[in-house]
Amino acid sequence: MNLSSMKHITLILCFFCTIVLSRYGYAEGTEDTSVPLTLEKCVSIALEKSPSLAISKSDLDAKEASLSAATKELYPSLNFQYGYTRLFRPLATPVIQEPENYYSYAVTASQPVYMGKSLVTGVAISELTLDASKSNFFTSRNNLIYSVHQGYFNLLKAEKLKSVAEQSLVNLQSHKKDAAAFYQAGLIPKNDLLHSEVELAQGEQNLLMAQNGASYAMAVLNNLLKRPVDAPIEVKDLLTIEPVAISWESVQEKALANRPEISAAELSLQKSEKNIALEKAAYLPSVTVSATYKKQGDDVFAGSYELGENTVTSAQAVASWDFWTWGKNRDKVSAAQQLKKQSSESVRQTRDRIILEARDAYLDLKQAGKNISVTEKAIVHAKENYRINEARYQAQLNTSTEVLDAQTLLSKARSNYYSALYDYRIASAALNRAIGIIDSQ
């Protein structure tokens, strides 16, 4: 095969790969930036790549392993020992009936029978710790989803505010052009022209701030998705609003029932109660039974023993009780009781905080819903006001001040409308988080 044929084959393969990638997607590790990201997709990416969620998941796995270890403390254990003893005798010492070289090995099976309920209590504490870790995991997940909602709708709002600033600048440029023409014709004084130029400069500054705001909002969302902060990103707009009809009584009930923070606090209280029982276990005796199979001898494998039995089998039961520890156990129980009081107050504090968060989110949603209807009417009035003032200015019936004021009102009305629109979506996500049911909706 000559060089020309190889080049043709290479080109054909490259063309084929391009078609396949364009038809079935990009290679692993790349993203198709030509398709706007939906809210659901952003949430999915954030959940997959979040370091904080990975830490919570790792903690959950660790607690599961700890529970498994605590459970196995109830099972019997096997122990193997091998020993060697060398007896050094002085030369003048008469012969003693003990071998100079003594070898032994033994296998022992031990089973705890009663440990003052410390083992079963330890298992119960590990179960509660695992459940608390699950609650903390869902708390981290809910917070992350809410942050994505915030970043997503703040980006949409920032883009809309940038569009408003761009349209405002276009109107100011047009007005300045008209003002310059009127001034050249001697129809308006110079201060009117200067006023329009000052407002035009302010419009350029407003656009720059809006652009920076959009860039920062994009960086925030990129950071949540673990993408470069300056990477271009396009998200699908969500202008349709579905009003949420929910009563405060329902919000309060769902928040107390669903918030994982309350569950974690209650589990901590139960754990502190178990800790008291664990410390009290030290007052009680412990019982352990064991069985041992032992071989001894005067060679490495303990094959024979001239001075006694080569094989020894034994069983024993050991009861132990620390009946005097200078009040140490009493102090430990007292400390555990104080920790229970702290946990009890923490439950009450957590419930109060959750109720306050839910109330704040509920009121914010109601306010945001009312703001939408108010700002919609304001846009209609502001548009008409601007049209009338612009027409009067063209007819030289008013000055630049009235037109520029009308333009400012129109831009403010549009900005307020888009802010109300996306603030409502953020408030809706905040309420869902407050009652513990936030997802990608």
Image: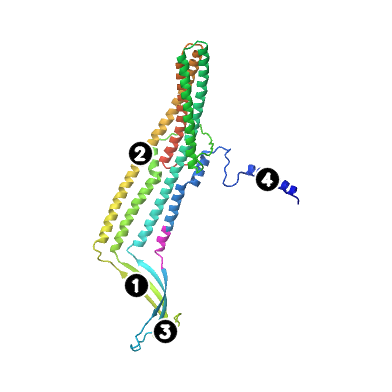
Give the residue pinned by disc 2.
356
**Residue 399 placement, left or right of 13:** left
Q: Which residues, given as a range, are shown in magenta?
A: 66-76
Give the residue pinned by disc 4.
14
Res 358 seen here:
yes
Q: Residues within 10 Å of mark 4 (few under 14, many from 20)?
A: few
Give the residue pinned by disc 3.
305
The extreme left residue here reads 326
Q: Vertically, is 252 above or below 317?
A: above
Name the mark on residue 370: none
Secondary structure found at label 2: helix
Asked whether residue 71 is drawn in magenta, I would say yes
Measuring from the top left, give residue 192's x and y in whole percent: 46, 15
Q: Nearer the viewer, mark 3 or mark 4?
A: 4
Contact between marks 3 and 4 (CB within 8 A): the answer is no
Q: Residues within 10 Å of mark 3 (few under 14, many from 20)?
A: some
Tag 3 or tag 2, which sits nearer the N-term?
3
Q: Residue at x 47, y 46 (%)?
A: 50
Give the residue pinned by disc 1.
317
